[in-house]
Image: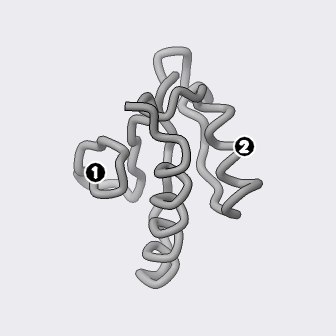
Amino acid sequence: NEIGLPCFEPKGAFYAFPSIKGTGMTSEEFAERLLIEEKVAVVPGTAFGQCGEGYVRCCYATSLADIEEALSKMKRFVARYQTV
């Protein structure tokens, strides 16, 4: 939420499913550009069905330092493309 991607707090898994609708990108475009531009990998929401469009899946089963670095990069990326 603080980086500009609305997300419900996960309850029991190590995945988050934030909305990327405010960027104006498809979930596949968002995932590809984030990987190329910031070297952060997420899974397009459409990998889980068409209802997943507008979302990406983020795994946080890693160290706190890696999570903080990825969030910093995602925040910078979202700031570049936020449309609403």
Instruction: Please state, as top left, top right, bottom left or bottom right, where the C terminus lies in the image.
Output: top left
80 up-or-down from 55: above or below: below
Q: Name the residue under label 1.
A: 1
Q: Residues within 10 Å of mark 1 (few under 14, many from 20)?
A: few
Give, as a three-letter code, the residue at label 1.
Answer: Asn
Q: Pick the residue in front: 68 or 58.
A: 68
Give, as a three-letter code, the residue at label 2.
Answer: Glu
Q: In this view, does 18 lie to the left or right of 11?
A: right
Residue at the top extreme, as displayed: 50
The residue shown at (76%, 54%) is 36
Q: Pick the residue in front: 32 or 51.
A: 32
Tag shown at residue 17: none
Tell me where residue 41 appears, x and y as whole percent: 65, 56
The residue shown at (55%, 54%) is 77
62 up-or-down from 12: above or below: below
Look at the numbered discs 2 and 1 and tell me whether their residues touch, using CB distance below 8 Å: no
52 up-or-down from 69: above or below: above
Q: Is residue 18 left or right of residue 35?
A: left
Dividing the picture into quadrants, the one containing residue 64 is bottom left
Colour pattern: one colour
The residue shown at (24%, 43%) is 8
Q: Residues within 10 Å of mark 2 (few under 14, many from 20)?
A: some
Q: Pick the residue in front: 82 or 2.
A: 82
Tag shown at residue 32: 2
The residue shown at (36%, 56%) is 3
Q: In this view, does 9 lie to the left or right of 37?
A: left
Secondary structure of the residue carrying numbered label 1? loop
Number of callouts in the render? 2
